[in-house]
Amino acid sequence: MADKIKVMIVDDHDMVRKGLKAYLATEDTIELVGEASSGHQAVRRFEDLHPDVILMDLIMEEGNGIEATQQILAKDPAKKIIILTSFYDDEQVFPAIEAGAMSYLLKTASSEEIIQAIYKAHAGKPVIDGKVAQKLITGLHKTPQPVDQLTTREREVLKLIAEGRSNAEIAKLLFIGIKTVKTHVSSILSKLGVADRTQAAVYAYQNHLFSK
Amino acid sequence: MADKIKVMIVDDHDMVRKGLKAYLATEDTIELVGEASSGHQAVRRFEDLHPDVILMDLIMEEGNGIEATQQILAKDPAKKIIILTSFYDDEQVFPAIEAGAMSYLLKTASSEEIIQAIYKAHAGKPVIDGKVAQKLITGLHKTPQPVDQLTTREREVLKLIAEGRSNAEIAKLLFIGIKTVKTHVSSILSKLGVADRTQAAVYAYQNHLFSK
DNA sequence: ATCGCGCTCCATCTCAAGTCGGAGAAAAAA
DNA sequence: TTTTTTCTCCGACTTGAGATGGAGCGCGAT
């Protein structure tokens, strides 16, 4: 049927896929054309399955949902991708939206919400979960992070500081002079508004700059 | 039927419950007697539902699975509880086992694994996912953390170092002299095997000493 | 072509940080 | 009771860190 909306499910939890299948089975205008249990698999398979809408989990063993979203949209920007995940951290929401995801739902969503999101995604209308929307709003008018003022080189230096490196070590690692390192460090400290390298390292960790 | 194994599902994701229901439906010796979408709800309902086995998610909005497990087992230690979650961090696995959970499965588990785990749990036999078992093993004979060698006072000082405090600040905060602080710091550095306070702060963050 | 920015480098100076060696007092362990 | 540990403090010393004020070079924007 040309009228049916073709849906693909990407989730590494078999039971979630089963549950979603049960949701979709109630709608005769929606057709499940395929599944994938990892981001990599999704990227490999979607071209053969040519789905209209993709339900995408974010956290998966092989190839996370954000990368998969980017890669799929790079090949076919017309695909509508609905992020369907358990969490709504800043670190997940923003990259997902940037990657081009159309909608963002939580796994606590009901059958109706998912179905509606699929129809709307197919019509080009995004659906964002309330809690996620909150994150987006507060994220937008949050005070600009001091980190953004750092130059590329300064970020490199900060990373090494956060590893506990001394100025001499940093100099050797970056193939520059100690004096230069000191210049960068001073600039980093003033930009971050901290007093010394230890506070800079603390800043880096508390703002999850280089974590995981 | 008195022969059927009565199962209760506790998970805040409707789609997961749906998927699990589909699993259980294939077994005619297993009967789903009820569901709960939160830990609190599970504790309130299980006595009326009198399940033999409970499939329990860990991370839920209201009342996490570990608390629920403790509370349910406190009321009825005969209940077999199977933890069914997405993660296998040390911080999740150990408390769950301590709370008295019989089995620990990941949500990537297949239908057969879940079914088998239910039968075994009912027979009093635990099932632990391979990856989780790894965690348990490595967790048991993990090398004694250097942190444990720190004295109470030294831990206090380390915490302040990890906040980016200077020796002078630490002295004032702890109502002791700077020289004393230096003594503690030196001792901390040598015990942790690091070169300076910045590395000590990094150590603290990387070992999640004061983060949560 | 000029301007600003980012990266590099330098010298000098000040001071916090850290080491070393020592010591007294109180509390816990032997 | 004696011993050990912990917490406290001190002085003297070395050195790394950081501030300050320069400077030249390449590059993209105006």
Image: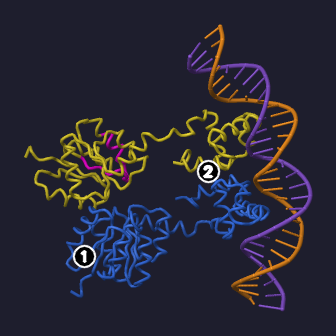
Chain colours: A blue, B yellow, C purple, D orange
Which marked residue is nearer to the observer: mark 1 or mark 2? Answer: 2
- Please tell me how many numbered marks the rendered image carries: 2
Q: Residues within 10 Å of mark 2 (few under 14, many from 20)?
A: many
**Residue A125 vs residue B33: left or right?**
right
Most foreground residue, A13 or A83: A13
The verdict on residue B64 being magenta is yes
Subunit ID for the residue under disc 1? A
| Amino acid type, callout 1 | Leu
Eyeballing the image, is B58 above or below A12? Answer: above
Query: Could you give the CA–CA distance between mark 1 and mark 2, rounded to whole angstroms?
Result: 48 Å
For disc 2, the marked residue is B202
Identity of the residue drawn at 21% across and 75% down: A27
- Residue A192: x %, y % from top left: 69, 61
For disc 1, the marked residue is A32
Pointers 1 and 2 in contact (CB under 8 A)?
no
**Residue D14 vs residue A44: left or right?**
right
- Considering the numbered disc 2 on the image, is that residue within a helix, a strand or a loop? helix
Most foreground residue, A174 or A72: A174
Subunit ID for the residue under disc 2? B
Within the image, what quadrant is residue B180 found in? Answer: top right
Q: Which mark is residue A124?
A: none
Residue segment shown in magenta: B54-71
